[in-house]
Amino acid sequence: MQELTAVISQIDDEVKGKKARLAPEIKKLRTLRNKFTEIESEYNERKRNYDAAQSSVDIEKERLDKEMGHSLNEYKENESKFHANNIQADIYEAFQKRLSNEAKHLSNPDKRLSPEFKSY
């Protein structure tokens, strides 16, 4: 029994010694845990703000992309129509010029042929 009491007493002394040695480290750990909790709550708050702002920006970007996509398609369509109209106008002017030249030549047949071909 005395041996058991001596062993218990020795274990008790070792535990008290280790507690005494670890007490400053445990105190530091508690202060660090408190700081961590404060920093974590600040981080979470800022993250919520960032996520909200990011979501808002993403929604606005999607809206602008959709709007610009429509405007860009409309612009391309109008540009194609513009070029097609210009080509049609050039074709029409060439046709009008041809008709005018044919009308001149039909109204004055002598001028229609150049002098070297009049003998034929």
Image (tube, rainbow, N blue to C red):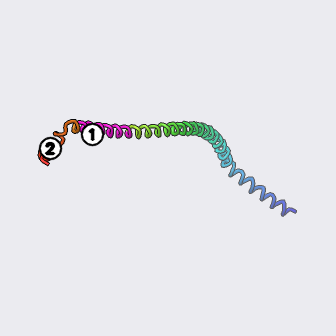
Secondary structure of the residue carrying tag 2 is loop
Dominant secondary structure (helix, strand or loop) of the stretch shown in magenta: helix
Secondary structure of the residue carrying tag 1 is helix
Name the residue carrying label 2.
114
Residue type pointed to by label 2? Ser
Of residues 60 and 79, the one drawn nearer to the viewer in this rendering: 79
Rendered location of residue 68, percent (x, y): 49, 38
Residue type pointed to by label 1? Arg
Instruction: From the viewer's perspective, tell me whether residue 97 is left or right of residue 3.
Output: left
Front of the two marks 2 and 1: 2
Name the residue carrying label 1.
98
In the current view of this chain or complex, which residue is farthest to the front? 120
Q: Residue at x 29, y 39 (%)?
A: 94
Of residues 93 and 111, the one drawn nearer to the viewer in this rendering: 111
Instruction: From the viewer's perspective, tell me whether residue 82 is left or right of residue 104.
Output: right
Of residues 8 and 68, the one drawn nearer to the viewer in this rendering: 68
Image quadrant where residue 118 sits: top left
Of residues 39 and 109, the one drawn nearer to the viewer in this rendering: 109
Is 66 colored magenta in this rendering?
A: no
Do labels 2 and 1 touch, CB within 8 Å?
no
In the current view of this chain or complex, which residue is farthest to the right? 1
Instruction: From the viewer's perspective, tell me whether residue 33 is left or right of residue 74.
Output: right
Rendered location of residue 97, percent (x, y): 27, 37
Q: CA distance from mark 2 to mark 1?
A: 18 Å
Part of the protein shown in magenta: 83-103
Q: Residue at x 68, y 51 (%)?
A: 22
The tally of labels here is 2
Image quadrant where residue 107 sits: top left
Numbered label attached to residue 37: none
Is 92 colored magenta in this rendering?
A: yes
Rendered location of residue 116, percent (x, y): 12, 47
Rendered location of residue 20, percent (x, y): 71, 50
